[in-house]
Amino acid sequence: MKIFLILSIITLAILYITNKVLYSAKRNLFKDMAAWSGKDIKINYSKSDGIDKSKKHDNYLKVIADESKIYLEDKSNKEEEVE
């Protein structure tokens, strides 16, 4: 009877600790998601001569990276003009 009581207390303690750890991990994992959930992300897109026209078998990740690079360069140039 004593062994059963000790094992049940240990089992309950392990379940309680596991529950707390999993809850904490889940909360930390999704805390940044809550900050972005209600916001619309607007991207200003402008076609540039530096980007080749896409073909059927282009590497679309490269096209997106090139567009992002041009966008960021334009953004940094505008910030330098303001200062």
Image: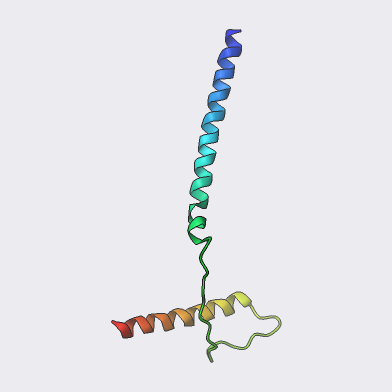
On screen, residue 53 versus residue 56, left or right, reads left
Outermost residue, bottom direction?
49
Residue 61 quadrant: bottom right
Is residue 80 toward the left or the right of residue 10 in the image?
Answer: left
The residue lying furthest to the right in this view is 56
* Residue drawn at x 51%, y 37% as measured from the top left: 21
Residue 31 sits above or below residue 76 on the image? above
Q: Return the x and y of residue 52 as percentages of the image width and height.
A: 59, 88
Furthest toward the left, the residue is 83
Q: Is residue 72 above or below residue 37?
A: below
Q: Observer-nearest residue: 56 or 33?
A: 33
Residue 73: quarter of image: bottom left
Residue 38 percent location from the top left of the image? 52, 62
The colour scheme is rainbow
Name the residue: 55% across, 34% down. 19
In the picture as drawn, the residue positioned furthest to the front comes out as: 38
The N terminus sits in image quarter:
top right
Residue at the spot 54% in from the left edge and 92% down from the top edge: 49
Q: How many marks?
A: 0
Q: Quadrant of the C terminus?
A: bottom left
Name the residue located 59 percent from the left edge and 18 percent from the top edge: 8
Q: Is residue 58 left or right of residue 81?
A: right
Please state the horizontal and vertical placement of residue 74, each as a whole percent of the image: 43, 84
